[in-house]
Image (cartoon, rainbow, N blue to C red):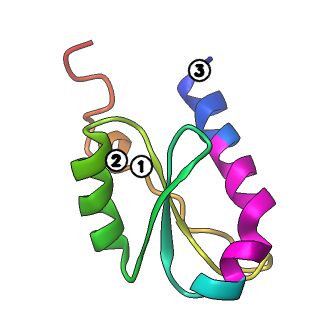
């Protein structure tokens, strides 16, 4: 599965759970990897730091928990920093 397919899978997983997450975590950020929420955080920076600590330098999704018309903030720090294929 390509990196794009993996990211789309994580986005789909997040969108399926958006309503439940909104009920308790509106305005926060979720770390998603392998179709599992690995934590909810108050800021994107905290989500990124926790994702790196828990998951390592691998692709993972940081998604803003907001309304459907408010698109999630999708960030992959490893991709943004050019680290996605380091050592590959």
Are the residues flagged by discs 3 and 2 in contact, CB closer than 8 Å?
A: no
Q: CA distance from mark 1 to mark 3?
A: 15 Å
Residue at 41%, 49% in the rendered image: 76
The quarter of the displayed image where residue 14 is located:
bottom right
Are the residues flagged by discs 2 and 1 in contact, CB closer than 8 Å?
A: yes
Q: Main secondary structure of the magenta part?
A: helix
Residue at 63%, 45% in the rendered image: 10
Q: Is residue 76 above or below residue 56?
A: below
Along the viewing direction, whichever of 84 and 36 lies nearer the viewer: 36
Q: Which mark is residue 76?
A: 1
| Mark closer to the chain start, 3 or 2 | 3
Reading the image, the residue beneath label 3 is 2
Residue at 75%, 49% in the rendered image: 12
Mark 2 or mark 1, which is nearer to you? 1
Question: What quarter of the picture does the N terminus occupy?
Answer: top right
Q: What's the magenta region?
A: 10-22
Reading the image, the residue beneath label 2 is 80
Q: Which mark is residue 18?
A: none
Magenta residue check for 13? yes
Q: Is residue 44 above or below residue 54?
A: below
Q: Secondary structure at mark 3?
A: loop
Mark 3 or mark 2, which is nearer to you? 3
Q: Residue 67: x, y in percent?
A: 74, 82
């Amino acid at each position: 599965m390509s990196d794009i397919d993996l990211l789309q899978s994580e986005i789909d997983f997040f969108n399926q759970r958006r309503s439940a997450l909104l009920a308790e975590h509106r305005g926060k950020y979720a770390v998603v990897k392998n179709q599992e929420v690995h934590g909810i955080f108050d800021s994107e920076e905290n989500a990124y730091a926790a994702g790196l600590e828990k998951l390592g330098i691998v692709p993972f999704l940081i998604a803003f928990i907001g309304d459907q018309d408010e698109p999630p903030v999708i960030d992959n720090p490893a991709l943004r920093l050019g680290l996605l294929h380091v050592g590959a």
